[in-house]
Amino acid sequence: MTTPAVSFEFFPPQSLEASFRLWDTVQVLAPLAPRFVSVTYGAGGTTRELTRDAVTTLHKNSGLKVAAHLTCVNATRAETLGIAESFANSGVTDIVALRGDPPKGDGKFTAHPEGFTSSVDLIEALKDTGRFAIRVGAYPEKHPEAANQAADIDWLKRKLDAGADEALTQFFFEADTFFRFRDACQRVGIDGDRLTPGILPIENWKGVTRFAERCGTAVPVWLIDAFEKAERDGRQDLLATAICSELCSDLLEGGVNALHFYTLNRPELTRDVCHALGVVPRARLQNVA
């Protein structure tokens, strides 16, 4: 089994305690030499400034390649491109370009009157600057708002044709879900190597099932049964590590070369899974200036 390239997603801290947790997370995972780490936006762009601060701080102090999430929500084109320019000027030239979720309480995305109308619109503008490597999101089980998977894959192809370099998928629980998605993408001309599976280690089973429902991710019956038994026996962490490691191993055996982990700023399970896959410490985190 080939040792995969790995990347990690963090979310920006919203308190002093959360800031310490983020830095602790980075310290645990940085020695695994990820090819990049990313920092998310909140729904409706609610963490825009926090994301900017976290991105620039990590870029300056961690020694890691940092990718900043950027969305179209609640901002003009000029404001959004201004944020992108500030990232580039600080040395951050990797962007995860997303349409973004609407603010809580809003039923659907509504473009700002002077803003980008879609992720494709944003990607084209970022590409035109010539300053960024661009990643986008993808949905192995289709976006909840998409009419069907074929339409969703056509939209993914538009994003890649607009200038995106790579697609990071939503999480899923069975390797065959990704393989079916990859096959469908290849049939419309998308290179399977541009698709990186998103992996969500199950730190909190009830929280993950709620998240899966919002994202349209199917939860297999066998997984529900396994966690119900594990909770009775107090073996949730062992089960989570075993299931995630097996999922990743199956993906690697199926030709996947890179994995993107959604850490939720809780690094231990992600670290343990990476170790099981042969991803061992290779680098030390730089000291904070």
Image (cartoon, grey):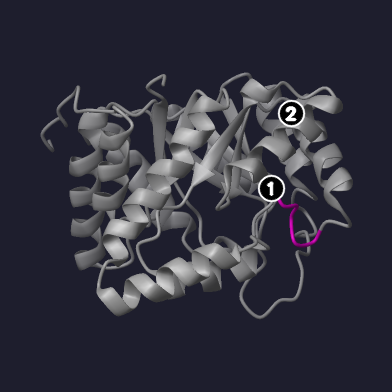
Decide if residue 35 is on the left or right side of residue 132.
Answer: left
Circles 1 and 2, Cβ within 8 Å, touching? The answer is: no
Q: Is residue 143 magenta?
A: yes
In the image, the segment drawn in magenta is 140-145
Decide if residue 84 is on the left or right side of residue 160.
Answer: left
Decide if residue 54 is on the left or right side of residue 246.
Answer: left
Few, some or many C-alpha atoms within 10 Å of disc 2 (few <14, some 14-19, many ≥20)?
many
Quadrant that contains the C terminus: top left
Q: Secondary structure beneath disc 1?
A: loop
Residue sitting at x 24%, y 51%: 268
Tag 1: amino acid: Tyr
Q: Toward which corner of the image does residue 113 lie, by quadrant? A: bottom right
Q: Nearer the viewer, residue 192 or 44?
A: 192
* Viewer-nearest of discs 1 and 2: 1
Tag 2: amino acid: Leu
Decide if residue 103 is on the left or right side of residue 266.
Answer: right
Measuring from the top left, give residue 44's x and y in whole percent: 60, 65
Residue sitting at x 78%, y 48%: 118
Reply above or below: 13 against 170: below
- The answer to whether one can see residue 263 in this image is yes
Q: Nearer the viewer, residue 202 or 25?
A: 202
| Residue indicated by mark 2 | 160
Quadrant that contains the N terminus: top left
Q: Earlier in the sequence, mark 1 or mark 2?
A: 1
| Residue indicated by mark 1 | 139
Prevalent SS, magenta region: loop
